């Protein structure tokens, strides 16, 4: 088989395992929450699509919240995310999450430095409460090199099918690369905890990244009898081992 055939075959096998794992998870009444974060164009949408392609439509929700309303900006910061948390038997996937306040908001000036600092203090406590309520929290940061990001952002502009991926903030992703790197490093340092650990996935190769993300989720959920092995730690690693390994 060619490289494409190998990928499709492995993806199908992992998606079958996802179906089996979700069926078991529903029976067990698990509350699964998967948080996807990462730089623009790092592959969140593509990874989520492969995860949910054959998932239970009634037991699976993808949450991608728009810009907060004026009323929401006056609420407790986590308040607008809480209604979307999973109940028993549900899988909820956040395509960006409360971690906007650790990345795009401070970099773009959408929050004050004081609000940023307060968030970094509060989020470990918030995620400890989530764990205490029985939610299985899986946090994934998708990493991409500056050159690959530039290539993908340019491709979006030329592809009419990617119109909804184009954002006014795309240009800032490259201009503010160093600022986003500093914000990311601070987030991983302050928000990688026992109750809310971060896992970093290299995504310059989209297909390999998708397979590794699914493997990671399956190994975290630990379905009895599953033979899925953890992905290579050279491309999927814990946040406390990120220094010097993330793309510059």
Image (spheres, grey):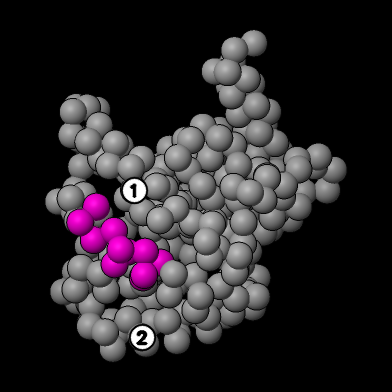
CB contact under 8 Å: marks 2 and 1? no
Q: Residue 143, position in %: x, y? A: 45, 51
The answer to whether residue 178 is magenta is yes
Which residue shows up at 22% across the image and 27% down it? 159
Q: Residue at point 22% right, 36% down?
A: 154
Q: Is residue 235 above or below residue 211?
A: below
Q: Quadrant of the N terminus?
A: top right
Spatial CA distance of label 2 from label 1 is 27 Å
Reply above or below: 10 against 5.
Answer: below
Q: Quadrant of residue 227?
A: top right
Q: Is residue 233 magenta?
A: no
Q: Which residue is mark 1?
A: 146
Residue 122 in the image: state x and y as whole percent. Answer: 45, 85
Q: Secondary structure at mark 1?
A: helix
How would you classify the magenta stretch by its main secondary structure?
helix
- The magenta region covers 174-184
Q: Is residue 116 left or right of residue 62?
A: left
Q: Which residue is mark 2?
A: 117
| Pick the front one: 105 or 246 | 246
Q: Residues within 10 Å of mark 1 (few under 14, many from 20)?
A: some
Task: Tell me: residue 79, above or below residue 156.
Answer: below
- Local crowd size for mark 2, using a 10 Å CA cut-off: few (<14), some (14–19), many (≥20): few
Tell me the element at label 2: helix
Query: Relative to residue 30, is residue 78 drawn left or right?
Result: left
Write the residue at 25% across / 69% down: 107
Q: Residue 182: which quarter of the image?
A: bottom left
Closer to us: 246 or 83:
246
Q: Nearer the viewer, residue 132 or 42?
A: 42
């Amino acid at each position: 088989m060619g490289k494409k055939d190998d990928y499709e075959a492995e993806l199908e096998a992992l998606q079958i395992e996802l179906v089996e794992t979700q069926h078991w998870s529903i029976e067990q009444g698990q509350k699964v929450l998967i948080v996807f974060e990462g730089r623009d164009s790092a592959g969140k949408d593509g990874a989520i699509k492969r995860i949910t392609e054959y998932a239970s439509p009634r037991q699976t929700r993808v949450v991608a919240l728009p810009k907060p309303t004026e009323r929401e900006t006056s609420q407790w910061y986590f308040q607008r995310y809480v209604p979307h948390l999973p109940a028993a038997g549900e899988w909820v996937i956040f395509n960006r999450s409360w971690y906007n306040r650790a990345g795009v908001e401070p970099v773009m000036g959408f929050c004050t430095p004081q609000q940023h600092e307060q968030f970094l203090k509060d989020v470990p406590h918030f995620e400890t409460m989530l764990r205490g309520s029985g939610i299985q929290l899986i946090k994934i940061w998708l990493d991409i090199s500056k050159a690959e990001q530039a290539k993908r952002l340019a491709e979006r502009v030329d592809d009419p099918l990617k119109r909804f991926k184009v954002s006014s903030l795309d240009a800032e992703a490259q201009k503010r690369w160093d600022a986003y790197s500093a914000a990311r490093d601070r987030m991983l340092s302050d928000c990688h905890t026992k109750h809310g650990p971060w896992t970093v996935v290299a995504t310059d190769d989209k297909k390999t990244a998708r397979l590794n993300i699914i493997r990671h989720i399956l190994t975290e959920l630990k379905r009895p009898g599953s033979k899925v092995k953890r992905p290579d730690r050279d491309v999927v690693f814990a946040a406390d081992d990120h220094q010097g390994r993330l793309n510059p």
